[in-house]
Amino acid sequence: MGKLDGKVAVVTGAASGNGRGMAIAYAREGADVVVADVDPAGMEETARLVKQQERRALVHRCDVSKKDDIDALIAATVAEFGRVDIAVANAGVAEQDTDCFTMTEAQWDRTIDINLKGVFFTLQAAANQMRAQGTGGRLIAIASIMAEWGSSGAPAYCASKGGVRQLVRSFGQACGPYGITCNGIGPGFIETNMTTRIQESPEVRQMLEDRTPVGYIGDPDDVSNVAVFLASPESRFMNGTVVYPDGGITSGNYSNAMRLLGEQMKAAAQG
């Protein structure tokens, strides 16, 4: 028996990276999974991998910057599976080649609309469905170590992830009385498509490994393992908090590391 037998999980941003990893992990533990994203090929591949775990998968295109898309996602989930037990607000973007002095309004709006607005309305739509069901549920939002740190090279991203941390607290308070918990996951540096530039620069990668106490960058399984726990009955007394699978990097005073990261990322892009 799996930890999530009979559950229905919705994962946004599930076409690749951590989202795909969580979708597969949930299926492995017995859940049927709704794969939501804007990348058709990526969604189909994730769905194929979910079905390999002998679970059902529903592919649904969803642009989380649009509330109507999110509402349609939850409605489609209920139409197909009859319920929502787990919802993971994972979809996110990171701005590139900008900083506090050069960021444009369009760059700011895109990051905030996807990373913060999208998370809020995903949690809201799922929470309202769970309340209507009356059987509780698990809400999970993906934050980042940047919810704790700042970076001159990613001001909107840092602001959005700090906002996600506060949304987790707010939904935790609002939903707890209904048997619904809301927690966050704040990954450190993980090998996904979002960190391609870090992986491609030996200097940047070495710097991050040197500053991570365990000595290496994580992979999506390190995030998925936490996601399974937070979706399971074992986490029943956790609510309104963010867990950081980060190799210990936020346990130290690494504020200077973000300045160095920004400088080395720019150098790598120019070189």
Image: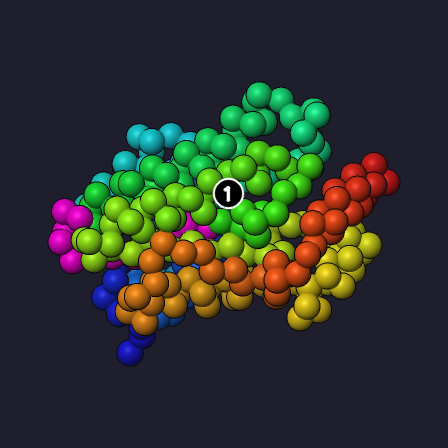
Badge 1: residue crowd in 10 Å (few <14, some 14–19, many ≥20): many
Residue tagged 1: 162
The residue at the point 69 percent across, 37 percent down is 153
Q: Is residue 245 left or right of residue 259?
A: left
Picture layout, residue 133 above or below residue 247: above
Q: Residue furthest right?
A: 271
Q: Is residue 155 left or right of residue 173?
A: right
| Residues shaded magenta | 131-142
Q: Residue furthest bottom?
A: 1
Nearer to the camera, 85 or 260: 260
Q: Is residue 9 visible?
A: no
Where residue 55 appears, as percent x and y from the top left, is 31, 64
Where residue 146 appears, as percent x and y from the top left, is 58, 47
Q: Which residue type does callout 1 highlight?
A: Gly
Q: How many marks?
A: 1
Nearer to the camera, 16 or 84: 84
Check if residue 136 falls in the magenta segment: yes
Q: Residue furthest front?
A: 253
Which quarter shows the C terminus? Answer: top right
Q: Is residue 13 left or right of residue 1?
A: right
Where residue 200 appears, as percent x and y from the top left, is 75, 52
Q: Is residue 241 visible?
A: yes
Q: Is residue 188 left or right of residue 175?
A: right
The residue at the point 32 percent across, 71 percent down is 234
The residue at the point 69 percent across, 31 percent down is 99
Residue 36: quarter of image:
top left
Q: Residue furthest top?
A: 105
The residue at the point 29 percent across, 78 percent down is 1
